[in-house]
Amino acid sequence: MSTLLEHGRTHDCGSLRAADVGATVVLFGWVHRRRDLGARIFVQLRDRFGITQVVFGKDLDADAYAAADGLRGEFCVAIRGAVVARGDNTNAAMATGEIEVHATALQVFSPADVLPFNVADDDKLDASEALRLKHRYLDLRRPSLQKNFVVRSRLATLTRIALAEQGFLELETPYMVKYTPGGARNFLVPSRLNPGMFYALAESPQIFKQLFMVAGMDKYFQICRCFRDEDLRNDRQPEFTQIDVEISFATPERVFAPIEGLIRRAWSEILGVTLPDPFPRMTWAEAMSRFGSDKPDLRFGLEFVDITDLAHRSGAKIFESAPAVKAICVPAAHAETLSRGRIDKLTELVKKRESGGAKGLAWAKVQEGGAWNSPLTKFITPEFQAEISRHAGAETGSVILIVADALHTVHAALNALRLELRDSLDLVKHSGSDPWRFLWVTDFPLFEKSERGYVSAHHPFTSPRLDQLPLLDSDPSQVLAQAYDLVLNGNEVGGGSIRIHQSEVQAKIFQVLGLSEAQIQQKFGFLLDAFKYGPPPHGGIALGLDRLSMLMCGAQSLRDVIAFPKTQKGTDLMTGCPGGADDAQLAELYIRHRDLPADV
């Protein structure tokens, strides 16, 4: 007699409907729940497609009923039975709720020990993240996580289809590459065959995809793994996945078009959401001026209002020496919770270094008739109070929050304040705006100033705006890049640029960066050699597959969309990685142990 495994399953656990009543089916899956009512044993059988109720009874099949008495949660089993309508007992909460299967055979593939945490009910999950990561293979059985990985898989599949249909070639680049100092910290891999030499794990395919353009591949894409030895957080992992794209003869618009097409298709086919065509654009300067961020969340208001001139003319000494004075106006509908104690906590927020380190937070509550309730009334006349209120768009009951400091400090502090108010006042929920706000941010600065001079804001192959090339000699800080980021709901989900392909422009950039000829050759010599042989103009972008998946799923952490993630200390609690190596292994790599400092 053949086993149920040899017979094979006829349906998954999420597919049976009323039209299947009367059919004999074979299902495979895990015991989700079990209830023993004496004459009947009810089992909810689960696989990644859904849940089906299975009924065992002596009158249905005595052997199957007897075997079902030993079933427990997460046993892996097969059942055969007849599909029966549930009639008045339909369960509207289940996709298969119109039917149940009356079992005539049961095969236990494997039993399960008592689980360290409940995987059947997400709403009853009380296990710590550390415990769930230690048993990640069980954590991944949870229906909510499985839905996340269905979305991620569909996004990857659609990426391949959509880009291939537009003529892109899927090409691979090396993981083990040459180590070049600068940029993100690399993971190093010792070479056994080349004693004392090291590979670096690629932080991105940047140089190789440019070489594909030199090679005449025209349009390239890759869903690739990247590696960065950085401190971790909810939206960062040491290994992550990019949708990497490069296009020959590119302009920013020629990069935007296929990416927007891919995103619109993914949101339509996976989420059933229609996105705007085209996505809106905003320059970096405008984003910083209005929101203090190069990745603004557009789902709610609280835009910055520049009151520098009014503040300086008001006569208030606390504003006199401040280069910039900007405000946020919290509407009356949301301002009633902003008590003096709450404002004191917001003041501490803007004074924190990671929030810009502002000197403080000034505030004013607009009362009936326009008068302010504020410590500022000692220094600002009613006339200026009314003028500032008008400029900020304040009405009775509004609260005006003001930061005065250097411009970059004002932007950082008010951005932190804006995001805190978004979350604490639940402004996105109350805004009634489109829940998916994509935005292209363009025209970033090409350089950033450091103690040692200029550094590239992106990477040294990012093209400046060609109309600003003379500024490379006179004032490099004013040069804008042909760089762009794709932003979604306050998250950067992609970034790219048009690349430099002209050797004289590249030489000028290296000169501004202060690189010597030896440094240039050591870091980028092979790429510059390739650029001697007719490189086409080109540009591209990299999208974060992990982050896009996280946002599409409504997950709170990248760890919810990465199958086997690391902790914030870069460890894998399930496998115990990273681990040590014995002396024999290290000797093969010409490495030996050294005692660690006592404080490590």
Image: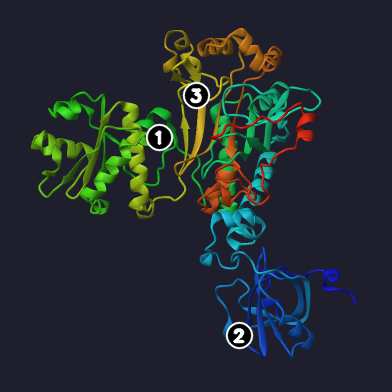
Residue 398 is tagged as none
Q: Is residue 254 above or below residue 471?
A: below
Write the residue at 68% across / 75% down.
72
The amino acid sitting under disc 2 is: Gly
The residue under label 2 is: 87
CA gap between label 2 and label 3 equals 65 Å
Kind of residue at disc 3: Ala
**For the point 15% across and 42% down, which residue is it?**
374
In which image quadrant can residue 114 be found? bottom right
Q: Is residue 303 visible?
A: no
Q: Is residue 82 left or right of residue 430?
A: right
- Residue 373 location in percent, x, y? 13, 45
Decide if residue 265 is on the left or right side of residue 297.
Answer: right
Direction from residue 375 to residue 55 in the image, left or right:
right
Q: x and y percent of residue 260 in the render?
A: 56, 40
The numbered disc on residue 293 is 1
Judge whether residue 456 can be spotted in this image. Answer: yes
Q: Looking at the rendering, in which quadrant would you find the N terminus?
A: bottom right
**Residue occupied by mark 3:** 457
